Image: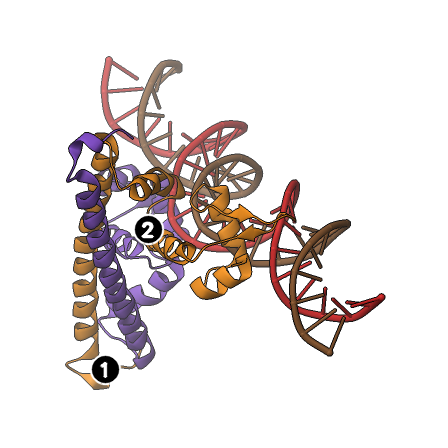
Chain colours: A orange, B purple, C red, D brown
DNA sequence: CTAGAACCTCACGTTGACGTCAGAGGCAAG
DNA sequence: CTTGCCTCTGACGTCAACGTGAGGTTCTAG
C-alpha cells in the first residue's frame, strides 16, 4: 500500500508517517521511482506508535523500545526501560484518577445545593 | 511570602509562577517596591494548577475553570466544560490502562521463555 | 496523451510552557 | 556601606511533533 492509503487507514497524516520514518519508528520499502510502500503490518505498527505517543513516550524512547518488540526479545536494559515506562504510566493513571475525582467534586460543589445562585 | 518561597514550597520554578500570573491563573499582591507577595492559599492554588496541567488541560482551559472553583459556582456552560474535561480524562485513563497492559504483555513476551535468547 | 491526484524532498513555520540571559533595582547581614 | 542573594521586566531561545508551502516527479483515469 502507498502512504496515502496507510494514512487513511490509520487516520494519521502523511506528514506524520514520514516523520515516523525519519525518527526510525516506521520502515518502508521503496518503489522503482522512490515512493514508499507498506505491508499490512504497518497499520498495526502505526497504531502502536500512536498509542505509545499517547502515553507520553517520546519518539526517542519509542525508537529504543520498538526493536525489542520486533525481535520479541529484551535485554536487561530494555526490560528495565519498559518496566520504568509502565511504572510511569501507572503513576500517571493514579494522578489522573485523583484529578478526575477532584473535578467531580468541583462539579458537585458548584452545581448546588442552591441552583438559584447561578448568577455568575 | 515571596515568589522564591512559593517556588520552593511547590517545587515549581519562579519563571513558571510568573507565567501562571501572566496567564491569569495565579494572582499576587505587590509590595511597595513591586515585588510579588503571596498568601498561604497560593501553595494549594499552584498545586491545583499543576494537577490540571498534568491532566492535559491548557492554560486557557484552566483559566476558564478556576474562577468557577473560586466562586464555588458554575454556569451551565462551565459545568458542561468541566464534565467534558472529566470525560476526556476518563477516556485517557482507559487508554493508558490499555497501553500499560500492552507494555506488560511486551515485557512478559520478551522476557521469556528462553532467557538464553537474550542475545540482542 | 493529458489532466489531475498523489507522491517526493527540502526547509521554514507553529504552538505551549516554560528556560535563560540582560540590565536594573531591592533587602538583610556584617 | 557593600556584599550577595532575591526580585523585577522585557525579550529571545527551546523542544517535540508535526503543519505548510515550494518546486518537481509519478501514477492513473479517461
Residue B120, horizontal then vertical, whole percent? 29, 30
In the image, C25: left or right of B44?
Answer: right
Asked if badges 1 and 2 are on one and the same chain, I answer yes
In the figure, is residue A36 to the left or right of B27?
A: right
Question: With respect to residue A62, does A42 lie above or below?
Answer: below
Residue B100's tag is none
In this view, the residue in front, C26 or A76, is A76
Q: Label 1, label 2: how many angstroms apart (C-alpha)?
A: 44 Å
Q: Residue at x 27, y 61 (%)?
A: B92
Determine the residue positioned at 24% across, 31% down. A77
Image height check: is B95 above or below D3?
A: below
- Left or right of C27? Residue D16 is right
Q: Is residue A16 above or below residue A102?
A: above
Task: Confirm or deny contact between disc 1 and disc 2 (CB under 8 A).
Answer: no
Residue that carries the numbered disc 1 in the rendered image: A117
Residue occupying the point 49% across, 52% down:
A17
Q: Write down the quadrant of residue D26 in the picture.
A: bottom right
* Picture coordinates of residue A21, whole percent (x, y): 49, 45
Residue B43 in view here:
no
- At 45% from the left and 55% from the top, the residue drawn is A39
SS under mark 2: helix
Residue A78 image position (x, y, % from top left): 26, 35
Instruction: Give the quadrant of residue B74.
Output: bottom left
**Residue density around tag 1, few if under 14, some if 14–19, many if 20 or more, within 10 Å:** some
Secondary element at image label 1: helix
The answer, for residue A71, to whether it is visible in the render is yes
Foreground of the two, D12 or C10: C10
Q: Which residue is mark 2?
A: A52
Amino acid at each position: 500500500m502507498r502512504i496515502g492509503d496507510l494514512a487513511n487507514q490509520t487516520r494519521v497524516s502523511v506528514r506524520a508517517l514520514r516523520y515516523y520514518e525519519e525518527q526510525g519508528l516506521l520502515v518502508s520499502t521503496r518503489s522503482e521511482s522512490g515512493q514508499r510502500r507498506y505491508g499490512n503490518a504497518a497499520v498495526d505498527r502505526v497504531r502502536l506508535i500512536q498509542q505509545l505517543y499517547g502515553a507520553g513516550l517520546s519518539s526517542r524512547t519509542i525508537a529504543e523500545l520498538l526493536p525489542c518488540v520486533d525481535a520479541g526479545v529484551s535485554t536487561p536494559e530494555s526490560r528495565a526501560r519498559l518496566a520504568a515506562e509502565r511504572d510511569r504510566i501507572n503513576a500517571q493513571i493514579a494522578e489522573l484518577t485523583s484529578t478526575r475525582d477532584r473535578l467531580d467534586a468541583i462539579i458537585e460543589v458548584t452545581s448546588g445545593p442552591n441552583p438559584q445562585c447561578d448568577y455568575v
